Every structure is written in structure tokens, then in C-alpha cells.
Image: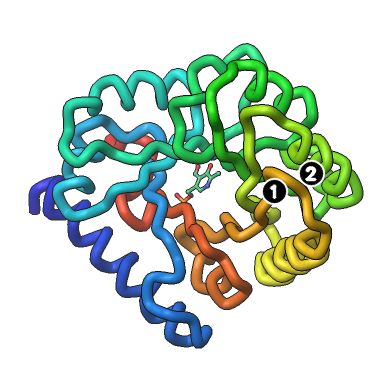
Amino acid sequence: MTREQAIADGLARVRARVAAAEQAAGRGPGSVRLLAISKKMPPDDVRAALAAGQRAFGENYAQELRDKRAALAAEAPAPEWHFVGPLQSNKVKYVAGQAALIHSVDSSALLAAIDGRGAPQACLVQVNVAGEAQKRGIAPEALPALLDALAAAKNVRCEGLMLIPPFDQDPRPHFAALRALRDREARHARPNVDLRELSMGMSDDFEAAIAEGATIVRVGTAIFGPRSPQP
Ligand SMILES: Cc1ncc(COP(=O)(O)O)c(C=O)c1O
């Protein structure tokens, strides 16, 4: 089987799983967007996914996003790039104004750096629902203040929340907790803030995320296979 065929098959399997999970959750077809995580995959893999009808791609590293975006700028239709990784303020210049959506805003300092670029930018706030020490994401108790800062931003608007659950626990209670946080904060009207998106769910757990209200699932391995090169 060619690499192109393997990627098309992976996409078809994931689309079928998404559709089944939408149906099981009583949600309409197409209510969940599939973001293909192309981190560490070469531009030709993105071309293969584009040829199979995938449009939205997510990257974890700022320079990789910049380079892949440049390599694929001439594709028609062009990929829609999302940034899903940890973002340091000094790398914001590679991402702000380039990504359709930055999923990983988790501090007022990062927000200020993105806003300071002067380009319109949509983002999600990454929340560390489980309070894991090593994990990026803002603590739930600090979320209202960051949303208030977003409400005052000049160029950045917030479209929802994002979560990476702990690797060693049942993710579903964490997905439910993110939705509950969203529902709570959505009751406070803020300019620039419309919490319609919940970015949660990866290859192994996106059905549970869809059952808990995910609107964007971020899927890498189940489409492209393992990220480390095979011997
Ligand atoms: C933030 C984020 N979301 C989603 C994924 C995709 O994970 P998987 O390959 O398990 O689908 C990754 C992979 O690194 C990631 O970093």
C-alpha cells in the first residue's frame, strides 16, 4: 500500500469513528471538526491528506508550523493551520497572524505577546483541569481573569477552551469538567469571548470527548501512524 493510500484509509477510518460518535451522542453529522495533527509528518503527508479531502491541520512546534505553511502555500485549496503546542513568547512571531486558531493560550503574558503582534488572531484557552504540575494550561480558578484579559484584547478573540487530559487516567471526567467550566463562563458575557469551541479528544479517546461535547478533535496517530520513524 502506498503512503498516500495509508493516509486516505486512516482518514476514512477516523471520519467513520467521528460520525459514529456524533450519532451515539445524539449530535448532528458534522457537528465535530476533525483537526489532523501533522506534527513531525513531512509536507507530502499533508498533501496526501489534502488530496483525501482533509483541510485543517494542527502543529505543535512554532518553526515547524512556519516551515510547513511555507512549503504548502501553493496548494489549492490551501491547508488551514492550527497551532496546538506550548508557545513561548519569543516564538509567537512564527504563529500569530499565521494560524487560523491558536489552541494553547494559557497566560496573560502569552496573550499580551500575541495581541502585541497587531494581527487579528482567534484563540482557545488551554485549561489544566486536573491541576497537573508538569502540564501547560491555566488553572481553572485563574480562567475568569484570563477571559477578562481577553475581553480587553485589541486583536485577539477567544472562541473556546482546550484540554489535554492526564495520560494515566480515564479522560472522560476531565472532558466533562472542561465542558462544565465552559458552561459556567459562558454565562458571563464578555466582548471578544464566545466560548463555542471545545478542543478535546485525541486518537485514543476522541469518542469520549465527543460524548462530552467536543467540537474539535485533534487526531494524529490514527491518521498518519506513529510519529517516530520506523526502523
Ligand atoms: C496537543 C495535541 N493534541 C493532539 C495530538 C494528537 O495525538 P494523537 O497522535 O494521539 O492523536 C497531539 C500529539 O502530539 C498533541 O500534542
Q: In percent of the image, x 66 and y 17: which residue is there?
A: 116
Instruction: Kindly check if marks 1 and 2 are in contact, taking CB atoms under 8 A apart as contact.
Output: yes
- Residue 46, given in percent of the width and then of the height, sits at 25, 39
Residue at image location 20% in from the left, 54% down from the top: 53
| Image depth: mark 1 or mark 2 in front | 1
Spatial CA distance of label 1 from label 2 is 7 Å
Name which residue lies at 15% across and 46% down: 3
Q: Is residue 221 left or right of residue 153?
A: left
Q: How did the renderer colour the structure?
A: rainbow
Quadrant assignment, res 203: bottom left
- In this figure, which residue is indicated by the disc labeled 1? 193
Q: In the image, what residue type sits under mark 2?
A: Leu
Give the vertical position of 219 relative to 37 (above or below).
below
| 219 relative to 169 in the view: left or right | left
Q: Is residue 163 visible?
A: no
Residue at image position (79%, 56%) is 189
From the viewer's side, name the closer residue of 115 and 26: 115
Query: Does 64 appear above or below 99?
Result: above
Residue picked out by circle 2: 147
Q: Earlier in the sequence, mark 1 or mark 2?
A: 2
